[in-house]
Image (spheres, rainbow, N blue to C red):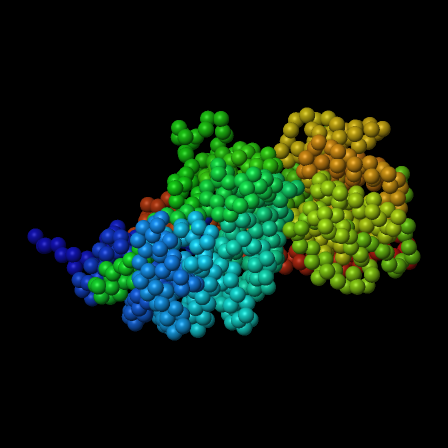
């Protein structure tokens, strides 16, 4: 019988056996998975003292063949510490190219800097009275060693040599490390306010130095790195980049595909991050290949800076995962960033995000569900409302700086005992270095960021199957891809003030239920019957979500024409200019600089003036008496403030430039809507809703008197009581309808047709009503047309609105419908391509988990057709080109005033103009 020899096994089989000892470090978390933004980016490397890595080291000493097989397992992830011994070991590793070539992830561990050690003897005496022995001599040696390293630039030399030798480097990580002695000193300093006079451990300076040396090494190296992360970054660490040559900074940023940062230093992060705003602009605009981004701040000191002051409205074509943490944001800020990445974004991580007043999480999640076709997961942890957060902290006391109010949520960081990574980082081909460990690398401080993707709650993510006893009997469930999810976001526990179910696991579970259903509808909706229209049944699908009916659905027979009894505007001679004011409702967090940049020519020519009201800043030059009623309070305040000095017409809009409710043919861009808006149409009609699309709002949206509560139109059951208070002399209408979302233009004559005191009364109602900010604003959203036209319904045809209102004339209702048919086909192709990518990703994931790196024959996988992705990409390009061609042709046709009159159904003669 032939004897078995381990040496006779193939390298592949041996590698499979070794995988059982030490899992293959090449199998990292894909960037579009939830775990990437926390586990892969922020976790410390596994400890080198673990038995498995020692076993691999011993195995490699057996022979040259085994050394080569085991090298990737031992050296793919390497960590080095800023200390004499740590840098020496890193230098040794860099001297072995056959080993250094395997390094793909490098973690640089930086300790606190000892800023002042002159009073160490006095500190030692004080320390020993409470904590026991303090070795002053040893600590002085550490201080001197650190000073020598920095002054001699030994760390700079070693890092440049090491990173230059890591020819397969992909990921660079900057970490904070502390030993037990540092930990004890920090505890003492925290408990004694006068300790700073004796000793000071400085992280900002250490982080800045570590970032500078890493950045300098990366600049001169040819390593193919593309990912950078740090879980506890000081804003000062980026200062050296601010002073660096822009070309150098852009060179670094151009390499980035993944950037995950968590800032934590001091109590004035807003001003510090504001100073770095231009730096972020340079980095993010240069990083054109970005696939994953996370920027976070302490949960107990959330940033209040506007989101776009950091991200500057940048769009990344390849972005698949995005996250923020510790931020006070508005719904528009969240949705604006998400929606401009809707074509590829798979994951959204919103951690410790506090929603500003006037917004609800229910609305945010509803819009994400509605519009984000490729979104697969959303991670919510400790989300809430800014108002409740501020009140909770006020109740906790102003002196509390480092911990959250007890009972509210888990701490954002914890000082766990953690064995450091000295192993692969310090391991060398010699046995001595492979087994080495040192006391100065015995403990790490880590920002644990315990979350639903990692840590104690990680197992909560595998939601129970349908037959599990853990499944709540009262909840309805659906089964997607073998997993069970709750099917209602109502369970989020969102009451507009708190989110009671934003604990680990629950919010993610609810969001899964939200997003598993996001797909474009595959059937064509039937044209509404006259009976359905008459009954007020709201059956028209949203154009963003449903396939259009090409039988005339959009340019579609108008509802019976309505002529308002109120005066229209005064038309001028053709070619005359009209004065117009842009009235914007914004919050402090919203950035409205787009008005100056996008409409500068209109402003400088005197064709446009602005009245930008800040809802939540009583010190602003224009502000309402109270932040309530959403934009309604601001619109009414403008009319009251400017009643005696109105321009020819006023344009009332929200403060954001891009929003889903803006017109699609105009790229959902408010600036384009303002630029293309026809003054003549506004003056002819007196009142023009700026949104052309019927859904939501037409033909019959609200039915006053209905008592059934519907989450997507909560104001409906309240509208009858409100109507009786607002219009006490007018009968309650059966239907209230107009296109959403409270953006319109009104002529001076139409505004003046109502006495000023009436507008004061309407504003007083907003101030007095017990309805919330959200509901009172929603009530006004569907009564503006009654205020300015005396009609409860205002639903002009879409094609007329686009043609006569904005100058995009397709020539016929059929041609107009066909553009949306193309849009539907485009979305269908995009969805199919996304499904193809998902199937391909699944195959790659199976390969990643397979010991052989291959897919087993018995694997039950849906294999996408080879080449179909290229076909779909080509189809998408062709459809997009045709849509663009037809849109340009419609714009050219709209230059003809006779065509506009024709499509609007009004008489026109030569010389009439628009």
Residue 273 percent location from the top left of the image: 57, 58
Residue extending farthest to the left is 1
Q: Does any portion of residue 607 appear in the rendered image? A: yes
Q: Is residue 534 left or right of residue 175?
A: right
**Figure check: 330 above or below 875:** above
Q: How many marks?
A: 0
889, 310: nearer the viewer? 310
**Figure check: 801 above or below 246:** above
**Figure check: 849 above or below 499:** below
Residue 206 percent location from the top left of the image: 44, 63
Residue 891 percent location from the top left of the image: 75, 58
Q: Is residue 743 left or right of residue 303?
A: right
Residue 519 percent location from the top left of the image: 55, 43
Q: Is residue 204 left or right of residue 180?
A: right
697, 301: nearer the viewer? 301
Residue ID at (68%, 53%): 657
Residue ID at (85%, 56%): 579
Residue ID at (80%, 56%): 609
Residue ID at (31%, 62%): 137
Locate the C terminus and report the quarter of the image it occupies: bottom right
Q: Does any portion of residue 322 appear in the rendered image? A: no
Residue 269 placement: quadrant:
bottom right
152, 28: nearer the viewer? 152
**Figure check: 831 above or below 388:** below
912, 243: nearer the viewer? 243
């Amino acid at each position: 019988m032939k004897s078995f020899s381990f040496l006779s096994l193939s390298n592949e089989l041996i590698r499979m056996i070794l995988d059982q000892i030490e899992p293959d470090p090449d199998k990292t978390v894909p960037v579009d998975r939830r775990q990437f933004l926390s586990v892969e980016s922020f976790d410390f490397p596994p400890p080198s003292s673990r038995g498995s890595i020692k076993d691999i080291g011993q195995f490699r000493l057996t022979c040259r063949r085994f050394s080569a097989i085991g090298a990737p397992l031992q050296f793919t992830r390497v960590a080095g510490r800023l200390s004499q011994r740590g840098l020496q070991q890193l230098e040794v590793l860099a001297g072995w190219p056959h080993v250094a070539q395997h390094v793909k992830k490098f973690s640089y561990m930086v300790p606190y800097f000892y800023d002042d050690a002159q009073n160490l003897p006095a500190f030692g005496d004080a320390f020993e009275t409470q904590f026991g022995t303090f070795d002053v001599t040893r600590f002085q040696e550490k201080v001197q060693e650190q000073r020598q390293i920095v002054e001699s630039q030994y760390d700079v030399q070693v890092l440049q040599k090491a990173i230059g030798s890591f020819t397969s480097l992909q990921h660079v990580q900057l970490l904070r490390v502390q030993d037990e002695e540092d930990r004890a000193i920090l505890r003492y300093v925290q408990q004694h306010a006068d300790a700073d006079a004796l000793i000071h451990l400085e992280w900002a300076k250490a982080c800045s130095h570590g970032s500078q040396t890493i950045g300098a090494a990366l600049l001169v190296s040819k390593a193919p790195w593309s990912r950078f992360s740090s879980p506890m970054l000081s804003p000062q660490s980026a200062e050296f980049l601010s002073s660096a040559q822009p070309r150098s900074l852009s060179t670094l940023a151009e390499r980035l595909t993944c950037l995950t940062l968590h800032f934590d230093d001091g109590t004035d992060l807003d001003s510090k991050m504001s100073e770095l705003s231009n730096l972020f602009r340079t980095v993010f605009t240069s990083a054109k290949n970005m696939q994953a981004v996370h920027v976070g701040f302490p949960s107990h000191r959330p940033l209040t800076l506007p989101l776009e002051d950091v991200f500057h409205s940048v769009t990344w074509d390849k972005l698949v995962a995005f996250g923020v943490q510790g931020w006070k944001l508005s719904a528009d800020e969240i949705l604006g960033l998400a929606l401009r990445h809707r074509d590829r974004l798979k994951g959204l991580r919103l951690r410790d995000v506090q929603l500003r007043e006037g917004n609800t999480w229910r609305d945010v999640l509803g819009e994400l569900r509605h519009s984000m076709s490729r979104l697969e997961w959303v991670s919510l942890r400790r989300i809430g409302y800014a108002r409740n957060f501020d009140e909770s902290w006020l109740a906790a006391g102003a002196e509390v700086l480092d911990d959250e109010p007890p009972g509210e949520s888990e701490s954002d960081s914890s000082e766990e005992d953690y064995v450091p990574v000295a192993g692969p980082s310090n391991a060398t081909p010699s046995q001595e270095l492979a087994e080495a460990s040192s006391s100065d690398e015995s403990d790490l401080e880590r920002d644990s960021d315990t979350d639903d993707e990692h840590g104690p709650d990680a197992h909560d993510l595998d939601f129970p199957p349908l037959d599990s006893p853990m499944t709540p009997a009262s909840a309805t469930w659906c089964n997607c891809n073998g997993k069970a999810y709750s099917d209602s976001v109502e369970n989020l526990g969102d009451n507009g003030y708190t989110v009671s179910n934003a604990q680990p696991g629950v919010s993610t579970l609810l969001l899964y239920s939200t997003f598993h259903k996001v797909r474009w509808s595959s059937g064509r909706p039937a044209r509404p019957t006259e009976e359905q229209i008459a009954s007020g049944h709201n059956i028209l699908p949203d154009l963003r979500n449903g396939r259009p009916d090409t039988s005339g659905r959009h340019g579609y027979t108008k509802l019976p024409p309505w002529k308002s009894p109120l005066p229209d505007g005064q038309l001028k001679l053709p070619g005359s200019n009209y004065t117009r004011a842009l009235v914007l409702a914004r919050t402090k967090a919203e950035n409205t600089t787009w008005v100056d940049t996008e409409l500068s020519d209109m402003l400088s020519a005197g064709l446009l003036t602005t009245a930008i009201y800040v809802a939540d800043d009583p010190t602003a030059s224009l502000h309402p008496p109270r932040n309530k009623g959403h934009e309604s309070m601001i619109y009414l305040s403008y009319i009251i403030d400017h009643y005696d000095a109105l321009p020819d017409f006023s344009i009332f809009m929200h403060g954001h430039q891009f929003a889903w409710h803006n017109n699609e043919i105009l790229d959902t861009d408010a600036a384009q809507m303002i630029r293309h808006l026809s003054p003549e149409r506004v003056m002819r009609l007196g009142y023009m809703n700026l949104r052309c699309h019927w859904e939501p709002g037409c033909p019959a949206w609200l039915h006053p008197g209905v008592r059934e509560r519907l989450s997507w139109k909560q104001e409906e059951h309240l509208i009858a009581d409100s109507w009786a208070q607002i219009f006490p002399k007018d009968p309650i209408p059966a239907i209230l309808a107009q296109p959403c979302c409270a953006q319109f233009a009104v002529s001076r004559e139409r505004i003046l047709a109502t006495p000023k005191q009436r507008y004061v009364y309407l504003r007083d109602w907003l101030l007095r009503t017990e309805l919330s900010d959200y509901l009172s604003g929603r009530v006004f959203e569907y009564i503006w047309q009654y205020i300015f036209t005396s009609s409860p319904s205002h639903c002009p045809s879409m094609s007329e609105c686009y043609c006569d209102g904005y100058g995009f004339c397709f020539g016929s209702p059929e041609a107009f419908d066909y553009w949306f048919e193309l849009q539907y086909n485009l979305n269908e192709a995009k969805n199919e391509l996304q499904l193809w990518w998902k199937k391909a990703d699944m195959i790659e994931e199976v390969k990643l988990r397979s010991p052989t790196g291959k897919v087993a024959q018995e694997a039950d996988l849906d294999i996408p057709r080879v080449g179909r992705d290229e076909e779909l990409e080509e189809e998408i390009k062709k459809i997009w080109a045709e849509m663009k061609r037809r849109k340009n042709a419609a714009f050219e046709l709209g230059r003809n005033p006779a065509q506009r009159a024709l499509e609007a159904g009004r008489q026109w003669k030569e010389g009439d103009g628009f």
